[in-house]
Image (spheres, rainbow, N blue to C red):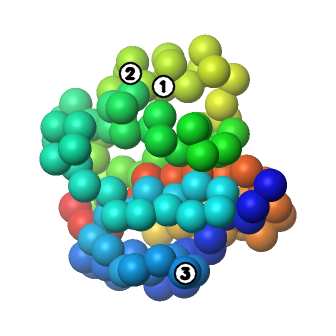
Amino acid sequence: MAQSPRITHLEWGEVRAEGLVPARDLKLWPGGGRAWDWRETGTHHVPGIQVADVKELLENGARTLILTRGMQLVLQTCPETLEYLSAQSVRVHVAETNEASRVYNELAKQGEAVGGLFHSTC
């Protein structure tokens, strides 16, 4: 299985990961990733990350997911999303973006099939 790209830079409004174009928000999975455009699924800070937001990560081989809350903990995760992931036996970490990035990079370094949604602002 392909390794998850590590996050190389994180600051307010920008996330960079190995081999990817910098973006405000990123979706990452084993072997790749792309910009995370909330408009695709109608995501908003509340109620937050939806099942539709995480499906692409699972389809690309992620078995552990890192879901960020943003730099100021504004982004929520829908309860239905956590229930869905639990039913799929997916490990989930929900954390502030800097902490989430640290956990994600550590798991990626260990070769775990990790994916994540990284929100670089509020």
**Would you name the residue on which mark 2 appears?**
79
Residue 75 at x, y = what percent?
27, 47
Q: What amino acid is labelled 2 in the image?
A: Pro
**Numbered mark located on residue 82 in the image:** 1
Labels 2 and 3 touching (C-beta < 8 A):
no
**Would you name the residue on which mark 3 appears?**
19
Q: Give 36 or 79, whichever is nearer the viewer.
A: 36
Q: Give 29 or 105, whichever is nearer the viewer.
A: 29
Label 2 or label 3, whichever comes before in sequence order: 3
Q: Quadrant of residue 112?
A: bottom right
Name the mark nearer the viewer: 3 or 1.
3
Secondary structure beneath disc 2? helix
Secondary structure beneath disc 1? helix
Q: Is residue 65 above or below residue 35?
A: above
Q: Is residue 15 above or below residue 97?
A: below
Q: Is residue 15 above or below residue 94?
A: below
Question: Which residue is at a point 58% across and 38% down the rendered structure image?
Answer: 58
Residue 78 at x, y = what percent?
33, 27
Question: What's the CA distance linking mark 2 and mark 1?
Answer: 5 Å
Q: What amino acid is labelled 3 in the image?
A: Gly
